[in-house]
């Protein structure tokens, strides 16, 4: 990997040359995406989704960059609804899907093979169908054939990784209309404000020492990241962060969520990447290390800990338990010489807290790619893979 050059982050001309598709600008428009998606959803007759009644179950068909829509819906449904939600966009439509169920198929291009195929099959079975994607696309046609609802998305949102909120908002509002969850448009507008605030803090013309995303990107350039969420909301953010690090920054990482992943993370703290003969006691590079005698430097393990706000005495006891577990893992990591990069969301609705984390780490992943001289929107070899047509959209 080419060395990380943080001067690229503050040099507008060089940064633009690397970020040719202007991915940073697309990320900065996330708040506007939410507001536009709310308007488009309200114009799409969402009252027709599932006939205005609560479906027996919901299945989400999404692949690639759109898979995050399924993860967020699962977060909202699993904790607030008796309705079963499943997600799989690449395989066959589950055999149990029938006339009492809702299938939500998501594809920015409207051409992703799996979601289109599942939407068509759902229509043949008489299931309720909601599709979200490009207008005048195969996905929109599948919704029309099923007498379902298609929500068109704004074409100016870049690729699926930067269009998360355009794709997510219609799904959230539609499942709210039919009684699966309860999230109002006012909550989504608060999410838009939170995304705007993060975009302002992480804007390209803010120098790296006052820009939290640039600072995080610089820190990430020095570690092999383990991304850990301290609960349900931050677990979804951790999964998204790991995906963005891989696809955007080309940095492999692993992710987990507490308490389930506590044991495997703590085990890694005593593994081969937890310490190195070429690191100083403070975790920095040991200038006295001899590469001939000590061998090449190994990547240093680092813990990226995504946290909810510190719980108060009025919070659910489980939140306090999760907080204490996260603190214990962080303490053990630091005691093992592992660098801990902790990020704490502001208070608010689940979606607001999620927006805090996703916005920050999306920007950081993009700056990390730019600092290494990589175009964050593309990577060599991906177009040569024998994948289903538009499988990543």
Image (cartoon, rainbow, N blue to C red):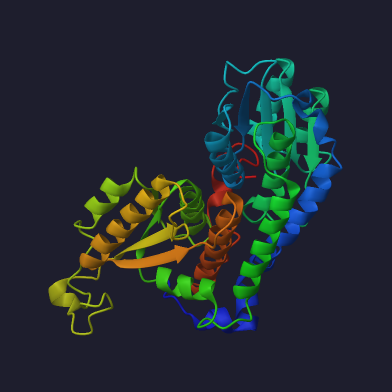
**Residue closest to the eye, 55 or 338:** 55
* Identity of the residue drawn at 51% across and 52% down: 240
Residue visible at 85% across and 35% down? Answer: 45
Residue 388 location in percent, x, y? 60, 36
Left or right, residue 276 beside residue 145: left
Task: Give above or below for 40 relative to 241.
Answer: above
Q: Position of residue 41 (x, y in %)?
A: 80, 43
Quadrant for the C terminus in the image: top right
Q: Quadrant of residue 259?
A: top left
Is the N terminus in the top left, top right, bottom left or bottom right quadrant?
bottom left
- The correct choice, above or below, for 377 with respect to 231 in the image is below
- Can residue 363 be seen here? yes
> In the drawing, does residue 276 fall left or right of residue 305?
left
Query: In this rendering, is residue 218 above or below 344?
Result: below
Report if residue 155 is visible in the image.
no
Place of residue 48 in the rendered image (x, y in percent of width and height, measured from the top left): 82, 29
Spot the residue most to the front: 313
Q: Position of residue 391 (x, y in %)?
A: 61, 40
**Position of residue 45 in the picture relative to residue 201 (left or right):** right
Does residue 11 appear to the left or right of 45 in the view shown? left
Tell me the quarter of the picture where residue 57 sits: top right
- Pick the front one: 315 or 102: 315
Q: Residue at x 21, y 74 (%)?
A: 278
């Amino acid at each position: 990997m080419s060395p990380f050059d943080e001067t690229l982050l503050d040099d507008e001309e060089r940064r633009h040359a690397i970020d040719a598709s202007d991915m940073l600008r697309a990320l900065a428009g996330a708040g506007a995406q939410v507001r536009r998606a709310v308007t488009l959803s309200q114009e799409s007759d969402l009252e027709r989704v599932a006939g205005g009644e609560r479906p027996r179950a919901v299945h989400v068909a999404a692949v690639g960059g759109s898979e995050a829509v399924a993860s967020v819906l699962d977060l909202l449904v699993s904790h607030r609804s008796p309705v079963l939600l499943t997600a799989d966009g690449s395989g066959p439509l589950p055999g149990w899907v029938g006339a009492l169920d809702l299938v939500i198929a998501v594809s920015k291009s409207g051409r992703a093979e799996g979601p289109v195929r599942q939407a068509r099959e759902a229509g043949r079975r008489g299931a309720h169908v909601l599709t979200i994607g490009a207008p005048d696309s195969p996905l929109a046609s599948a919704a029309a054939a099923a007498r379902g609802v298609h929500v068109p998305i704004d074409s100016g949102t870049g690729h699926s990784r930067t269009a998360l909120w355009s794709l997510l908002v219609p799904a959230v509002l539609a499942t709210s209309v039919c009684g699966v969850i309860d999230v109002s448009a006012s909550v989504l507008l608060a999410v838009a404000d939170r995304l705007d605030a993060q975009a302002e803090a992480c804007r390209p013309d803010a120098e790296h020492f006052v820009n939290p995303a640039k600072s995080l990107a610089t820190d990430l350039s020095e570690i092999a990241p383990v991304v850990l969420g301290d609960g349900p909301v931050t677990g979804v953010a951790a999964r998204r962060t790991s995906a963005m690090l891989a696809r955007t920054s080309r940095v492999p990482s692993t992710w987990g969520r507490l308490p389930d992943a506590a044991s495997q993370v703590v085990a890694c703290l005593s593994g081969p990447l937890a310490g190195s003969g070429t690191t100083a006691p403070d975790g920095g590079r040991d200038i006295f290390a001899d590469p001939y005698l000590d061998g090449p430097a190994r990547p240093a393990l680092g813990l990226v800990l995504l946290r909810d706000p510190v719980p108060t005495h009025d919070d659910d006891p489980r939140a306090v338990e999760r907080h204490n577990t996260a603190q214990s893992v962080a303490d053990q990591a630091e005691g093992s010489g592992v660098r801990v990069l902790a990020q704490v969301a502001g208070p608010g609705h689940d979606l607001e807290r999620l927006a805090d984390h996703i916005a920050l780490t999306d920007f950081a992943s993009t700056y990390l790619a730019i600092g290494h001289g990589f175009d964050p929107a593309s990577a060599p070899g991906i177009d040569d893979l024998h994948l289903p047509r538009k499988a990543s959209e």
